[in-house]
Amino acid sequence: MQFDFNTYTKEYIDNEAIKKFASKANEIKKKFETNLKELKWFQMSEYVDNAELKEIKELAVHLKETTDVLLVVGIGGSYMGTQAILSAMLPYFKKTQPEIIFVGTSLSSEYYYDLMKYLKEKRVSINVISKSGNTMETITAYELLMKMMHKKYTKKELKQRIYVTTNIHQGKLLEEAKKNGYRTFFIPDDIGGRYSILTSVSLFPLAVAGIDIIEFLKGAKEGRMYLNYASIYAMVRTILYERERVIEAFTVYEPKLYYFTEWLKQLFAESEGKDCKGILPISVVNPRDLHSLGQFIQDGNPCLFETNLYVDTCRTVTLEKYHEPMHDIEHLVLEKVCEAHTMSGSPSNIITLDSINEYHLGEACMFFMMSAAISAYLTDVNPFDQPGVETYKELIAQNLRVLK
Ligand code: PA5
């Protein structure tokens, strides 16, 4: 990975500002060298389990033979990382075998009506994922789909088709798995949803989709060498926030990284957005959004900075007219857009991935998880809880009880 936190931000960041945060950032970096429970996702040797990986790969082969559609049922950190990696890795216009459909993020009966119709003649398996085992949207989708599954398959067949990923202690999903003998993957206690991309939460569905999970884990493990860059990035973000840049646009030029920006939005919003603090993340896909949000970024309220996630090497086509590979023209657009936006008060960071493959995506995931955690620590908020989400969940639970 390469990092440029200077070319298009230097007017906004002076030595005084860096001095203000540098010693705090250094203290925070030391946390990663200790065995802090809350940073378990960083200590990969503590939870990456070779026996489980082997089994995941075997089950993936089995599902490829028996399944047309794998439904991945989950919400938030229980599916967004998987969708990000899967969509980045797939060639455009290609479906996986089995097809992977993410379910559990809507309560749209229109959606479920069409889904059931679509699944009618298909061989279906389900991976339901919920750390708490009780999330309303996930359980609702799961129960609805299980009605269909019970009509399609015998109890014995379901044992080969239902896979439950949850915590080891309690919850509706654990009870369900125990009662019916479904294969269970356990999410380590100290790893929360949005930091669980390196666990069976993502590894199982990714393996079923044919992604090389070993390379992905290798990239993530080696990505820990970017801790210092993660800390610089976190400092730059915090300084820009103090300069009233309260929105961060995660900007990509490769459309298939769109879901990666969705994962980033969740990672940063849930880690930082609390105690009336935090930077609001949005996602931008260029050049498309140069003709929509671009107007605001260039000319509107200067409340924003951009973090571009750029891909260095990719397959390319040559444009006869310019005698240049299209990728070089895209790069020129990136540079000139950063220049234009910076001139009008919207500074830009550029983070470059060498190319899109499992290894480099693994590196990027580790880099951004370290950055999100350090950013939250820098503003004295706990990166790993989400009290705001709990509040709405509790209100819904109370009202559902009233309706019963
Ligand atoms: O990052 C998080 O912790 C959240 O986004 C959770 O993943 C999300 O709320 C789903 O929770 P659960 O896995 O318990 O169903």
Image (spheres, grey):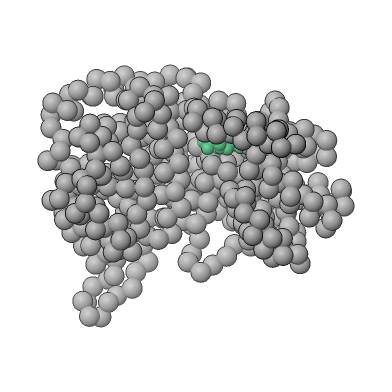
Q: Position of residue 283 (x, y in %)?
A: 37, 51
Locate residue 321, reporting x and y percent.
22, 80
Ligand 1 falls in which quarter? top right
The quadrant in which the C terminus is found is: top right
* Residue at image location 54% in from the left, 67% down from the top: 94
**378 sits left or right of 39 in the view:** left
Residue 17: percent from left, percent from top: 17, 28
Residue extending furthest toward the front: 402
Is residue 115 visible in the rendered image? The answer is no
Q: How many marks?
A: 0
Give me the residue at 78% from left, 37% from top.
Answer: 176
- Left or right: residue 249 versus residue 336 is right
Vertical side of 347 occupied by 120: above or below: below
Front in this rendered view, residue 165 or 227: 165
The spot of residue 47 in percent (x, y) is 57, 30
- The quarter of the displayed image where residue 98 is located: bottom right
> Going by the picture, which residue comes out furthest to the bottom?
320
Vertical placement of 47 versus 95: above or below? above
Which residue is drawn at the image coordinates 40% and 61% (left, top)?
255
Q: Nearer the viewer, residue 192 or 297?
A: 297
Tell which of 404 and 232 is nearer to you.
404
